[in-house]
Image (cartoon, rainbow, N blue to C red):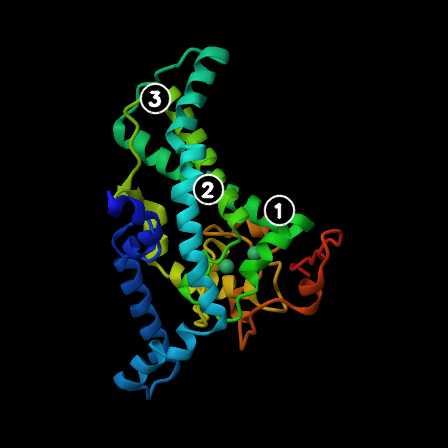
Amino acid sequence: MMLDAVQPLIAPLLYVNDPAKRLFWMHILGSVVLAAWYFRAALPGLGPGALARRLLCKKYWWNASTRIDYALLFLNTFLKLVVFIPMLGGQLGVALITARVLHLHVLDAPQISAGPIFVSLSFTMVAFVFDDAARFLTHLAMHRNPFLWRIHRLHHSATTLTPFTVFRTHPIESFINYLRSIVTLGLISGVFIWGFGAQLQVWDILGVNALGFLLTLAGSNLRHSHIPLGFGSFERYIISPAQHQLHHSIDHGHGNLGAYLALWDRWNKTFIWGSSAHNLSFGLNDYEEKASPNRVLPVVDFTR
Ligand SMILES: [Zn+2]
Ligand SMILES: [Zn+2]
């Protein structure tokens, strides 16, 4: 009983064992390996001791900027468990409503017969792309709408980027993100349940969308870090850590808004190659610091 009451307060400590979280031990291990590989390539003479000191540098992990990340990690997790989930429910509710509305008001469920592997692979792909597009549009709105920018700039006020900075969001942004995820995934699930019946299965790794899991393992934690790992010409498809760091830099704050796929930024002309990420400073510039709710941020065309 006591443990139940305390659980929402300490839930982030259990993320290390949750494959859906970026702090899952396998993702942390993957990031450490990538970071070590990057340092060894960039600084060839670096011995194991010096490498460990770099990775564990106290000033990097514990400073005025990172302390806000940790506090928001606990606050947002608490709010999600105690307020957002009880208030909004999960994606299953949205899925069942969607399937029912389609069945009653659009067309009787067609119950298309297709092999389970085809259904599960197409569901995994469609859910991943649709969710990624929704993330992009939400993020774009955060940068273009003056009210939403005032909320989102808390994420951009980080002057030290660590893998914990992903949790540095205003509680209202956290709420919007939760709402977005249950609506997008619920809608897609609902359409598939309506079309193919209820035996829907996502292609997963340890219960997580396989595409998301693999991309997280491939360096998502380094997006919020000072390691400008780029993907070379592959960046035209997948956003690299260096590209998200450009998004956080004082000079390029409104480019590379995508989560995984680069497609949306290329369409929206907000795509910047990661190779321009050198000696970046992170945080807000003077204009962004002072932007009032009525001032819209300048829109830059990055293709020029
Ligand atoms: Zn942003
Ligand atoms: Zn970020």
Residue visible at 33% across and 88% down in the picture: 45
| Distance CA(mark 2)–CA(mark 1) | 16 Å
Residue at 37%, 61% (x, y): give it.
219
The kind of residue tagged 2 is: Tyr
Mark count: 3
Q: Nearer the viewer, mark 2 or mark 3?
A: 2
Q: Which residue is mark 2?
A: 178
- Split into quadrants, the picture shows ligand 1 in the one at bottom right
Residue with the most extreme right position: 294
Residue at 35% across, 59% down: 218
First along the sequence among labels 3 and 1: 1
Q: Is residue 269 visible?
A: no
Q: Which element carries disc 2, helix, strand or loop?
A: helix
The residue type indicated by label 1 comes to Ala
- CA gap, disc 2 and disc 3: 26 Å
Query: What residue is pinned by disc 1?
Result: 141
Of the image marks 2 and 1, the number of the one nearer the N terminus: 1
Vertical relation: 33 (above or below) 144: below
Percent position (x, y) of residue 114?
30, 23
Residue 252 in percent (x, y) is at: 62, 65
Q: CA separation, marks 3 and 1?
A: 34 Å
Task: Say whether residue 194 is left or right of residue 169.
Answer: left
> Quadrant location of the C terminus?
bottom right
Circle 2 crowding by C-alpha within 10 Å: few under 14, some 14–19, many from 20? some
Label 1 crowd (10 A; few <14 / some 14-19 / many >=20):
some
Residue beneath disc 3: 196
On the image, the x and y values in percent for residue 280 come to 55, 74
Q: Is residue 113 visible?
A: yes
At x 32% / y 20%, what residue is drawn? Answer: 197
Q: Position of residue 149 (x, y in %)?
A: 63, 53
